[in-house]
Every structure is written in structure tokens, then in C-alpha cells.
Amino acid sequence: MDKIIIEGGRSLKGEVKISGAKNAALPILVSSLLTQGWNTYTNVPNLRDIQSTILLLSNLGVKTEVDKNTVRIDAGGLFNHEASYDLVRKMRASVLVLGPLLARLKKARVSLPGGCAIGARPINLHLRGLARLGASIELKHGYVEAKADRLKGNEIYFNMATVTGTENLMMAAVMAEGTTILKNAAREPEVVALADVLNLMGARIKGAGTSTIVIKGVSELYPVSVKIISDRIEAGTFMVAAALTKGDVMLLNAVPEHLEAVIHKLRLAGAMIDIDGQRIRVVGAEKISSIDVKTLPYPGFPTDMQAQFMVLMSVANGLSMISETIFENRFIHVSELRRMGANIKVTGDTALVTGIPMLSGAPVMATDLRASASLILAGLVARGTTEVNRVYHLDRGYEAIEKKFSGLGAAIKRVKV
């Protein structure tokens, strides 16, 4: 198991290229199950979750080819309708195969998912939606068993906006008979990216990016060649790192319109941000201003940036309040930040952060993907040495993060343990 060691106190300077978005790539790779023939995907990040998805698809009888950041998939030989526990337990997004398998093979048997320990994140909204499309659903021995001779369009209302639920139902509905309307649908850029790819395949989807998505079923979809959008969470993480270390960093291959909430909050915190197309320059202020943050579904402030922003507020001037409204267990990183001297008090879904002049390096342990990133950021700004253990979480969502930070002047290295 690897760990990352950081000598803090260096100001980050230079350019960093943002990788493709994991949360866009996963459903798009899975959407290949709806076609026969070779699909080509470029700008795919080299991550553990991507590798797990490719392994899962291969296990279903799909041909896959990987060359650096290009993935080719041919699902013409799809025959297996079961996604086993051993594959699904590693990654919650594996449940996304449920909709496409139902649409293509008329049946699916998928293990209940695993993933980061940041809340229950139930898939009941997925299952209710599939039932509305005419599928029979049973839960047996830790598996979802779904069958449908023919999916039929219907109106589906989500009690709460769900990204994977919206994506799963979109993929199930594209080949259903008639029209499906998804109400209170998730509006994230990753949902829009999937809809764009499905439309290139021949689907008829309108309204992606709004709360109402209308899908008119078609009889067949066709292979595509597409580029995965840039990762807005990786971009946000590097933006916070620049502000945190009083640095001067240029992000390349970023999408500013996906980052409006993060940009707004960073400017309030004192950072100077300049935007030129897909280039974002962030210059940190000498004094970081304390601000309040409340996570909300897109286009609100992303829950995936909450932990990183908490580090920034840990060394800001004054008191800030961070409210987490999406996941109930997403303050797990607080205890590790306290080990580094952070003054954070948690009451329910709210953290009160009193800024201090400087954090202190310490051995810490990562508990989930974004908590891992926050501990890396804390190490960059802390006095002394920080050791971040259990970084396998980090490898699920950040491509070569230590190399990218090293290229910006950070004293950071990965060590095999």
C-alpha cells in the first residue's frame, strides 16, 4: 500500500493540465453496452475506477482495448447479464450497468454497490424508476434482479436529484417504447455529457442540464467516437491549492462554466481568477478571507469540493461555516485535519471552522476520495512533514496527482509501503 509524503510550505507556480472527468467517463463507457461495434473514447483518465469499469464490461462479454488515455469498446458480443459482487463492491458507479443491460438483454442481475464510506446513497430511486418503465424488480441475496420483455416510456419523478439515477434511467429509456419524462432530474455537466453521447449514438434526448429530461425511444443505437469532458472536481482541487499556498497556477483544459460556484467562492476568499477560454489562472491572496459554504446539487457548490474548501478555511482569517446537505457522513476528514491543528467543530451537518495561521504536518489517514485530496492540500500548506496513508482512495479519482503537484513546485512524493 502506498503513502504520499509532503514537505509543506511551498508556493505553487506553473501550469497543470486537467484530466478527463471520471464521473463523466464511467457512465459513457457503460453506455457502449447499448451498441454493437467499436466505440472510441479519448481523454479517459487512467484511474482505478476506470480500470474497474473496463474489467466489469469485459466480464459481461464486451471487447475492450486500452491505449494510454484512449479506450475502445465493442459490446457486440454482450452475453452476460450479471455484474457480480466481487466487481461491483469496489465501485458504486457499477450500478450504472443495470439500465443498459435491461434495455439490451431484457434482464439484469447486479450486486448492490459499494464505494466510498460517505453515506448510504441508496439506489431505491433507480429501482422505482425502472419499475415505472415496466421492469419487475426483486432483491435477492444482495443482488438486484430486474426483468422486462419490453421497457415502455413513462413519467418518472425523482424525490431527490440523483446523478447516477438520472443517468441509469436515461440509458434504460433511450430504447424503450414511447416517451419517458424524467422530472427533478440531476443537472450536472456529467449528465449533459452522457446525454450528448447518447444523442450522437442516435438517441432522442432533450432537456439535459435542466430538471426535466424528455427521452423518445428509438429501436437501435450506433457506435461513436467522443472525447471525455474535463474533470471539474480535479480543476477545483488545483484552484483551491493555488489559493491555499498563495501560488500562481494556470489550469489548462478546464471548463470554467462547470466551475462557476467554486470560482465565485474562491473570489470571495480573496483569490484572483482570470479566465481565457479553457485556461483558468488562479493567484492566491496574502490573506485568505473566511466565507460560508453550503453544498447543493449542481449548479450549487459541489459536495465533492467541500473537504478541499474546509482546508482553505482552516487557514483563513476569521470564522466560517460549512454546511453539508448532500451526504450525511462527509465530515470524516475533520478528525484528520484536527490532527494537523485545524480548529473545526462539527454539529450535525454543519462545521464551524476558525482559521489559524498555519497547520502542522502529521501522519494522517485518508477515508474516502475527496478526503484524500483535502489531506494532500493540508500537507501542502502545513509546516513540516505530512504523511497521507491509504491513498488508494486517491487513485480512484485523481490521475497522477503527486506528479502534477510536483510539476508546480510542491515537495511531494509517493512511497511504497
Image (cartoon, helix red, strand yellow):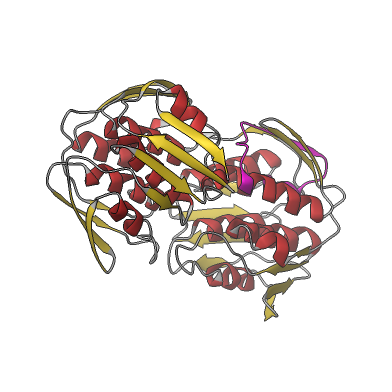
Q: Which is more toward the observer, 239 or 256?
A: 239
Q: Looking at the image, which residue is at 69% across and 74% down? A: 143
Q: Nearer the viewer, residue 417 or 353?
A: 417
Q: Residue at x 61, y 65 (%)?
A: 113
Left or right placement of residue 116 versus residue 43 in this view: left
Q: Does residue 372 appear left or right of residue 123 in this picture?
A: left
Residue 51 lies in what quarter of the image?
Answer: top right
Q: Which residue is nearer to you in this view: 22 or 415?
A: 415
Position of 90 with respect to 182 (left or right) is: right
Q: Position of residue 29 (x, y in %)?
A: 68, 45
User: Is residue 219 visible from the viewing direction of this image?
Assistant: no
- The reply to whether residue 186 is in sight is yes
Residue at (17% x, 46% y) in the render: 355
* Residue 41 rendering spot, x and y as whole percentages: 68, 34
Q: Is residue 37 magenta?
A: yes
Q: Is residue 121 left or right of residue 219?
A: left
Q: Can you say which quadrant of the picture contains the C terminus?
A: top right
Image coordinates of residue 408 in percent, x first then y, are 41, 23
Residue 1 on image: x %, y %: 59, 49
Task: Give the image quarter of residue 312.
Answer: top left
Q: Which residues are magenta?
A: 27-49
Residue 193 in which image quadrant:
top right
Task: Please tell me whether residue 185 is drawn above or below residue 27 in the rendered image.
Answer: below
Identify the residue at image location x=40%, y=63%: 327
Residue 257 or residue 351, whichever sits in front: 351
Q: In the rendered image of this protein, does residue 329 appear above or below residue 213?
A: below
Count of numbered labels shown in the rendering: 0
- Asked whether residue 223 is drawn in magenta, I would say no
